[in-house]
Image (cartoon, rainbow, N blue to C red):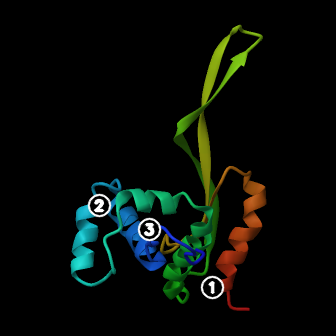
Amino acid sequence: MPEQTGRGRPRTPLGDVVFSAVVKAYEGKSGRRVTSALRVHFERGLTTKVVSYNTLSDYLSKPELTPLLRVLLQESAAPLKGVEHCFAIDSTGFGTRSYDRWYDEKWGRQKSRRRFVKVHAACGVKTHVCTDLIVSQAGDATQLEPLLDGTTQRFVAL
């Protein structure tokens, strides 16, 4: 994230945001419900401030955060390098809360369809560790090479 220039509210440190995002994902709760856990982590000195749920939501919607979270996922799987030698790559779709709506001239009525997001993942067959992950709306074939590259960088000894 770029440094703050000029006036305005001070930016929340990126380390605090990423830590809070990981806690939110681990707890499996909404931003509001994870606030008490974030407060406990702040009191223990793990963060410099309690990240509000609005700030957390704003940062998670920024595309600049995606590469950092992807590297964190890859690095967290790296300790299993000596155990994992076989990998499976697959994808699955998730429906979002937003819909595409249009008027269908042929049937003379309004139509809608839920928007989907695909998660492309490379996972270890033995340990089931996720070694790389890409969230997109692209087809499977275009994501195969980046997933292979991300996994082979840390797991395959050449």
The residue to which callout 1 is attached is 154
- Classify 85 as above or below 9: below
Q: Secondary structure at mark 3?
A: loop
The residue to which callout 3 is attached is 9
- Nearer to us of marks 1 and 2 is 2
Q: Which quadrant of the view contains residue 87?
A: bottom right
Q: Which quadrant of the view contains residue 82?
A: bottom right
The type of residue carrying mark 3 is Arg
Callout 3: few (<14), some (14-19), or many (20+) C-alpha neighbours within 10 Å? few
In depth, the one of 99 and 77 nearer the eye is 99
The type of residue carrying mark 2 is Val
Residue beneath the point at 50% across and 84% down: 80
Residue 127 horizontal/vertical position (percent): 48, 74
- Nearer to us of marks 1 and 3 is 3
The type of residue carrying mark 1 is Arg
In depth, the one of 127 and 55 nearer the eye is 55
The residue to which callout 2 is attached is 34
Residue 79 horizontal/vertical position (percent): 49, 87
